[in-house]
Image: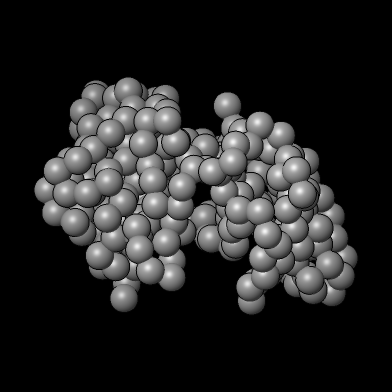
Amino acid sequence: DAKTTQPPSMDCAEGRAANLPCNHSTISGNEYVYWYRQIHSQGPQYIIHGLKNNETNEMASLIITEDRKSSTLILPHATLRDTAVYYCIVRGRRSSVNRDDKIIFGKGTRLHILP
Amino acid sequence: NAGVTQTPKFRILKIGQSMTLQCTQDMNHNYMYWYRQDPGMGLKLIYYSVGAGITDKGEVPNGYNVSRSTTEDFPLRLELAAPSQTSVYFCASSSTSGATLGEQFFGPGTRLTVL
């Protein structure tokens, strides 16, 4: 089972900020929050990740609550090209993959950008 | 860099046939992964490898085999194809160092149908 809970779908008007929530109430201290998106029929694309501080890059901002039980991905000025499924993933150390640290993609949030 | 490349893009198999899905990356990444994605679902990890000569099972390994003889290549083998293996298969790789530490880079996918 995925370690995260996301709404199945959301709408956002073009040009507005898209705020995508994610609950990860069982996150442990050494686990990171990653966000990926998947545009139709393509491979997933990395967006951003964080541990406990808020992060920003050229694509998006990531806001993590102080208790780390939830986070929000913000696309500041959504365009039609941002229509995609967005996956919030919790995983262990950035460089580790082992039997106890499987990377699990849930069903994600299908974001529709409305013209 | 070509990134992660996968061949073939599409394939139709008959029940009981076998095939190998090819995956190559030119980024000198240590970690490589195979995922499958069923229609409307998230990605499920089949197998992964943390380096040449080392492979391990993911969430759904049954019916598949992998090998990792070089850093660049991570082929996925289906020995006796079954309709339940109809899916889109994604290969990914990640680095254990540098600016992209922990970020997974995905290939374009192989769409497999078993009839």
Could you say which is closer to the camera, residue B101 or residue A11?
Answer: B101
User: Image height check: is B61 above or below A9?
Assistant: above
Residue at (61%, 53%) from the top-left corner?
Answer: A51
Quarter of the rendering occupied by the N terminus of chain B? bottom left
- Out of A60 and A113, give the one closest to the viewer: A60
Left or right side of A9 for B53: left
**Is residue A105 visible in the rendered structure shown here?**
yes
Question: In percent of the image, x 58 and y 27: which residue is there?
Answer: A1
Q: Quadrant of residue A115?
A: bottom right
Q: How is the image coloured?
A: one colour
User: Residue A60 appears at what percent x and percent y?
Assistant: 69, 68
Residue B87 in which image quadrant? top left
Q: Quadrant of the C terminus of chain B?
A: top left
B50 to the left or right of A100: left
Q: With respect to residue B101, does B78 lie above or below?
A: above
In the rendered image, residue B16, in percent from the top left (x then y), is placed at 24, 23
- Numbered circles on residues, count: 0
Q: Position of residue B12 (x, y in %)?
A: 33, 40
Q: Is residue B112 visible?
A: no
Left or right: where B53 falls relative to B35: left
Quadrant assignment, res B88: top left
A91 vs B115: above or below: below
**Residue drawn 43% across and 70% down?**
B99
Q: Which one is nearer the viewer's eye here, A109 or B51? A: B51
- Pinpoint residue B82: horizontal percent, then vertical percent: 34, 24
Q: Residue at x 67, y 65 (%)?
A: A55
B35 sits to left or right of B40 = left
Vertical placement of residue A104 versus A47, above or below: above
